């Protein structure tokens, strides 16, 4: 990662930590559920995701889940009709 991106990531994490800690004074409220969707990109997402999760959880105000890729799922195919062309018909 270029030095400028590294500095930006650290600065962003520091700002988030400051914000999170300042908001932590609002105690006695239920934890906020947070979902971080990360992965497969052109930046150091492993490290930034871990830093962001740690920052949010350090406040005591967040419950953080991380999803790095969606689960595989079967795409529902339309049922075959008599008006479909061969290209539109579901393949086996």
Image: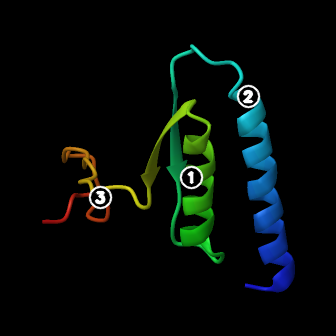
Q: Which residue is mark 3?
A: 85
- Foreground pick, 78 / 41: 41
- Relative image position of residue 47 (x, y in whole percent): 59, 70
Calculate the distance from the C-alpha at mark 3 to the C-alpha at mark 1. 53 Å
- Relative image position of residue 26 (x, y in whole percent): 69, 18
Q: Report the side of 63 relative to 59 (left or right).
A: left
Q: Nearer the viewer, mark 2 or mark 3?
A: 2
Tell me the SS state at disc 2. Answer: helix
Q: Which residue is mark 2?
A: 23
The numbered mark, 3 or 1, whose residue comes first in the sequence reads 1
Q: Residue at x 21, y 58 (%)?
A: 90
Q: Report the side of 39 relative to 12 (left or right).
A: left
Tell me the SS state at disc 1. Answer: helix
The numbered mark, 2 or 1, whose residue comes first in the sequence reads 2
Q: Report the side of 44 relative to 78 (left or right).
A: right
Name the residue at the bottom extreme.
2
Q: Which residue is mark 1?
A: 54
Label 1 neighbourhood size at 10 Å, few (<14), some (14-19), many (20+)?
some
Q: Residue at x 51, y 66 (%)?
A: 39
- Relative image position of residue 72 (x, y in whole percent): 28, 59
User: Given contact means CB atoms under 8 Å apart, are the residues at marks 2 and 1 in contact?
Assistant: no
């Amino acid at each position: 990662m270029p030095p400028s991106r590294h500095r930006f990531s650290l600065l962003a994490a520091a700002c988030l930590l400051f914000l999170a800690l300042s908001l932590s004074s609002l105690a006695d409220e239920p934890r906020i559920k947070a979902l971080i969707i990360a992965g497969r990109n052109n930046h150091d997402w492993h490290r930034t995701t871990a830093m962001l999760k740690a920052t949010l959880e350090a406040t005591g105000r967040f419950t953080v889940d991380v999803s790095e890729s969606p689960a595989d799922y079967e795409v529902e195919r339309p049922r075959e009709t008599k008006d479909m062309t061969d290209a539109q018909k579901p393949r086996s």
